[in-house]
Amino acid sequence: MIKKVILIIFILSFIRILIVLSNKDNCYDKTNKTITGSITNLIVEDDKLSLDINRKYRIILYDYNNKINYELGDKIIVKGKFTSARNNTVPNLFNYKKYLLSKKIKMISSNPQIIFVKKNTNIFYKIKNKIMKKISSYKSNEYLKTFILGDTSSLKKDVKQGYSNLGISHLFAISGMHVSLFLLFLNNVFKKFKYKDVVIFFFLLFFLFLTNFCESLLRCITFIFLSWLNKKLKLGIKNELLIVVTTIMLILINPYLIYNTGFIFSVTITFFIILSSNLFKEKGYLLKLLSTSVICFLASIPILAFSFFKINILSVVYNIIFIPLISFFYFPFAFITFIFPIFDDLYYELINILQYVVLKLSNIKLLTFVVSKPNFIIIIIYYVLLFLSIKINKKYIILFFIVLLININSRFFINNTRILFLDVGQADSIIITFSKGRSIMIDTAGVYKKSGSIVENKIVPYLNSIGVSELQTLILTHGDYDHMAEAINLIDKFKINEVIFNCYDFNNLELNLIKKLNKKKIPYYSCVEKLNINNKKLYFLNTKKYDNENDNSNVIYSVFSNYKFLFMGDASIDKEKDILKKYNLSNIDVLKVGHHGSKTSSSKEFIDSINPKYSVISVGENNRYNHPNYEVLENLNGSKVYRTDQNGSVMFKIKNNKLTIKTYAP
């Protein structure tokens, strides 16, 4: 009977997941709304404040100067434009819309009008507000927030990245390991109390409330409750089946949890630890720790590959070191420090030591591998093989590593050409990937205030997601900020074999980049006429020297499997005329429109002459230049136009001499 019920729940959960996955709603229409509600979550990051209202809406206030002292539970009225969050406009990368959906938030608004109604009267929010206020007064507040409130937003970005590089990020997401210590403490305190279980569950539920119903903790406490019921009712359900029941119950409540990486990490690693528990029952502490670390690592590989595109073999060793250190020292010491502020200075210094060690270790790249994003079939194969290795025969682990090895080297199995016009706002960046993963880039874009690092947030993650760990060539069309400002950052973060500049004089941006290239001993060239990569030729349509940087742009023409591509940089109408005089261009298949669709480029004469079938305009949403110009769009009337502000990144894929196009709209 129990198995039939579990099967029915599983089927219902599977159906709900299919409904979620089939939902292709990309609506980004802005709707005027007036929302009245209470603040259920509050996150301050530098000059940005995020407020969640009724656990349904997220309000983001930029340049927040703390004039109004908002608290949890406060009632407010919000008036403004609401929209669904944006999907990722670069393939394979973090999807903010899905992340918010996993937290049941479906609409957001930036800088709306907020009318304060009344202060919070809810006793639980009052307690939480006092705890938050007290924590903010500590020097070690970043880690008190992390371990007590489950809020990692205050951790420094480089430190977070360091934890991720070492494969120990999971230790800073409150879950089973931390709760087990909490339970041990509560069991000892209330061991003689008749209603001990009730008191413990009350504490656990309040802890869940404190952490804003953190997904990994929600999984943990649900599992604890079901385990308690299983024991009390003598149902005899095995723990590995119980974690499956826990998972599908939570997914039935909120199917968007499948998009939450923390939740997926939590249920997957817990399942395989429980599944393998019999393998190291008789072992000593160190062997158990090693075995647990290995199982955690093997179980996390598909998730790491899918979400972060990197694995660090040394994370097995790092987990052996940091699991007891974080779980038995830093985590409980956070609570001790909160209760006894006298320890704040000591805890702060110990945190600095931890961060220093982590940052030093994260620079060791010896056994860190870029792993292309696996598809769901590969992930299923991974886990089936790991399951068989644990339950049936350890020899299956060999097949597991063979599949992993193939995935690490997946770039060598690429037998197509992909040209990706990245959505980088009012800037240009194009990545071309040939067979066997050989890749080049045309322009790196530039970074503007609040947009974050394009290299760190878009370019490098995308390259890693397709298994690429080095660029054969970086081509810079010219020295304008929006085309090459991120070049130095890219060279610091990624391996590049050579750089090609345009012709004639170098400006300050280019000179600074050349200093960096000389320091790193990376060869560079200018005034190149032809480039041969992977038996594909790129021709640089040089004409003459102009008196402006835009017209001195590298204009590049290439033919990929009989499809003609023309990349115009920021070349103006003057250079277009000279190109038509010097070169015989016609029936271009794909045109990268010059100068973001400015009226200074893409003349009717030029467009009519080259007759592009498809045109791509790299342009920022609501840009101050009002690009693309309406006259340019009229000139391109006979071409299918793609715009990165509307269509997101645009991918042209050529396989078996067939061209397919895919867009990544917000």
Image (spheres, rainbow, N blue to C red):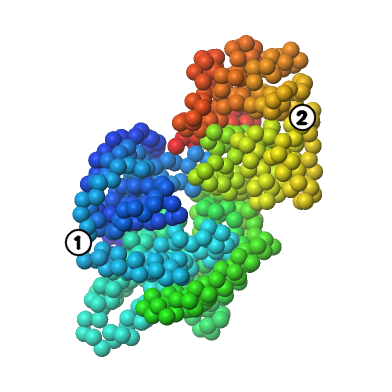
Q: Say how many tags the image has.
A: 2
Query: In the image, residue 329 lies at what x, y percent?
Result: 48, 78
Secondary structure under the numbered disc 1 in the rendered image: loop
Q: Quadrant of residue 291?
A: bottom right
Q: Which residue is mark 2?
A: 503
Q: Earlier in the sequence, mark 2 or mark 1?
A: 1
Q: Residue at x 28, y 35 (%)?
A: 32
Residue beneath the point at 38% across and 35% down:
28
Q: Position of residue 429 (x, y in %)?
A: 61, 36
Decide if residue 193 is on the left or right side of residue 313.
Answer: left
Picture quarter containing residue 186? Answer: bottom left
Quarter of the figure that contains the N terminus: bottom left
Neighbor class of circle 1 (other Cα within 10 Å; few <14, some 14-19, many 20+) is few
User: Which residue in the protein does label 1 denote?
Assistant: 121
Q: Nearer the viewer, residue 147 or 589?
A: 147
Q: Which mark is residue 77?
A: none
Q: Give the amino acid at mark 1.
A: Thr
Where residue 358 sits, quadrant-wise, is bottom right
**Crowd tier of the residue under label 2, counting other residues whose Cα lies within 10 Å: few below 14, some 14–19, many 20 or above:** many
